[in-house]
Amino acid sequence: MYVKLMKILSTQYSTMMIFALIVSVGLILSTTVVSANAEVQNNNDVKVQQKKDTKHVTVVKKIVKKTESKQEARPATPVPAPVTTPVDSLQQKLDACKAKDTPRAQYECEKAAKAGAGGSEFKAKATATKIGPVTFYYAGAKVESSGGKDIVNLRFLVENTGSNENISMLCTGPIACNYDITDGTTTFKYAANDFTNGNIVLKPGSSRMMNILFGPAIGYGSYIDFKFDSSKQYKFNVHEPWGSGSIPLNLK
């Protein structure tokens, strides 16, 4: 009886073990299948996301390319050059003259500054002739007629360009003037000038305008009226202790 009972129990135990084994195998297989399905799903999700990302990048690249193309096609806006205000050198000199101690000194300073400014413009259109330490700038002259008399006013810019000392230019009267004109045969004395007390004094590097007029004779002696002949060549003569020479006038 005992042996029979043991056989029955053994048979039932074996059956339970087999059932438990089957259940365990089923659980393992189920877990594996679920994991595999989950991995497959994850891979599918990754692929879908990669496709989305690739499509997004492609769209972005197209947008960037279109933007760059528009920027290249658009003409560059020219950048305006900076406007430089020219410096008025004359005004600077006049402003500097205000620092002089006395009204007289200010006046002389302003006079020299204005003369220098006018001289630069005159030089630009004149021909320079150097006689000794002085350079004569001459821009031509025109002969005029008044009352049957020929008159010509010669205008020079004279500048001390070759001496470290003051240069004096003398013309106090027809008999004592170191300047005249000639047509090659006749010499004519001046009729008027703007020399200060018969002198022009040029300091080193300084300049000033000089006017000397020829026309009806003045003074006493065998002076003759200036007469213009277009067939002749006229020259302005300089006879100074510091230098002598002639300047072609090309009168018209």
Image (cartoon, grey):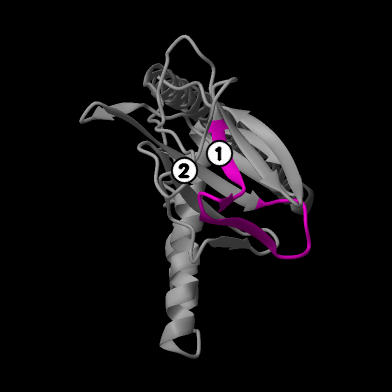
Residue 166 location in percent, x, y? 70, 65
The spot of residue 49 in percent (x, y) is 48, 29
Kindly indicate the quadrant of the structure image that contains residue 79. Answer: top left
In the image, what residue type sits under mark 2?
A: Tyr
Find residue 180 and name its label: 1
**123 to 58, vertically: above or below:** below
Residue at position x 37%, y 27% in the image: 142
- Return the residue at label 2: 190
Residue 76 in the figure: left or right of residue 235: left
119 lies left or right of 247: left
Q: Position of residue 177 (x, y in %)?
A: 57, 50
Q: Which residues are magenta?
A: 160-181
Does the residue at mark 2 contact the one at mark 1 (Cβ under 8 Å)?
yes
Residue 167 drawn above or below residue 139: below
Q: In the picture, which quadrant includes the C terminus? A: top left
Judge whether residue 12 can be spotted in this image: no
Q: Residue at x 68, y 44 (%)?
A: 239
3D distance between C-alphas at marks 2 and 1: 6 Å
Mark 1 secondary-structure assignment: strand
